[in-house]
Each structure stands twice: as C-alpha cells, then as structure tokens.
Image (cartoon, helix red, strand yellow):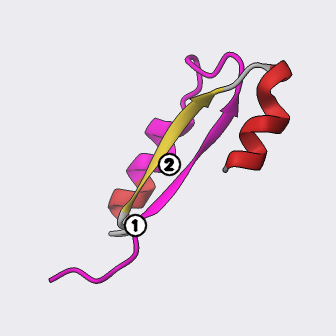
C-alpha cells in the first residue's frame, strides 16, 4: 500500500490556459516519484480573494 500523501498544487490566474506550468511541474513530480498533481486554476481577479479563502 502507498501511504504517501497526495500533493495538490497549481497555478492560479486569469487566463491560465496558456501556462506551461502544469506540464513542467507535472513532469518533475513524476520524475521524482512525488505523488501529486499540478493543476491550472482559472480565477478572475474579482473572485480571487474568495477562492484563496476557500483554498
């Protein structure tokens, strides 16, 4: 059984669809056998404070 914690990290912004961060960091997570995901989180400026509070 794999008891390592799952890391969930990402890049936040608007727009983030163009960001290469998920590809780059996803590669390094896998390369170093880190159990996790790096995701883009699309957040408009007007929603930023609320999203940060939720996270």
Is residue 48 within the magenta segment?
no
- The residue closer to the viewer here, 47 or 28, is 47
In terms of sequence position, does the residue under pointer 2 or pointer 1 come before the other?
Answer: 1
- Quadrant of the rendering where the N terminus is positioned: bottom left
Which numbered mark, 2 or 1, is in the foreground of this view? 1
What residue would you read off at disc 2?
25
Image location (x, y in percent) of residue 29: 42, 59
Q: Secondary structure at mark 2?
A: helix
Q: Secondary structure at mark 1?
A: loop
Q: Is 10 on the left or on the right of 54, as rendered?
A: left
Name which residue lies at 83% across and 21% down: 45
What residue would you read off at disc 1?
6
- The residue closer to the viewer here, 39 or 20, is 39
- The residue closer to the viewer here, 7 or 52, is 52
Q: Is 47 on the left or on the right of 18, as rendered?
A: right
Q: Which residues are magenta?
A: 1-27
Give the distance between the C-alpha atoms of the residues marked 2 and 1, in whole angstroms. Answer: 15 Å
Query: From this viewpoint, which residue is outermost toward the left?
Result: 1
Image location (x, y in percent) of residue 50: 78, 36
Name which residue lies at 69% across and 47% down: 54
């Amino acid at each position: 059984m794999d008891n390592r914690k799952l890391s969930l990290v990402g890049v936040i912004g608007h727009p983030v669809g163009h960001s290469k961060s998920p590809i780059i960091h996803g590669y390094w997570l896998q390369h170093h056998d880190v159990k996790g995901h790096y995701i883009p989180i699309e957040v408009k400026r007007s929603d930023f404070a609320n999203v940060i509070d939720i996270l």
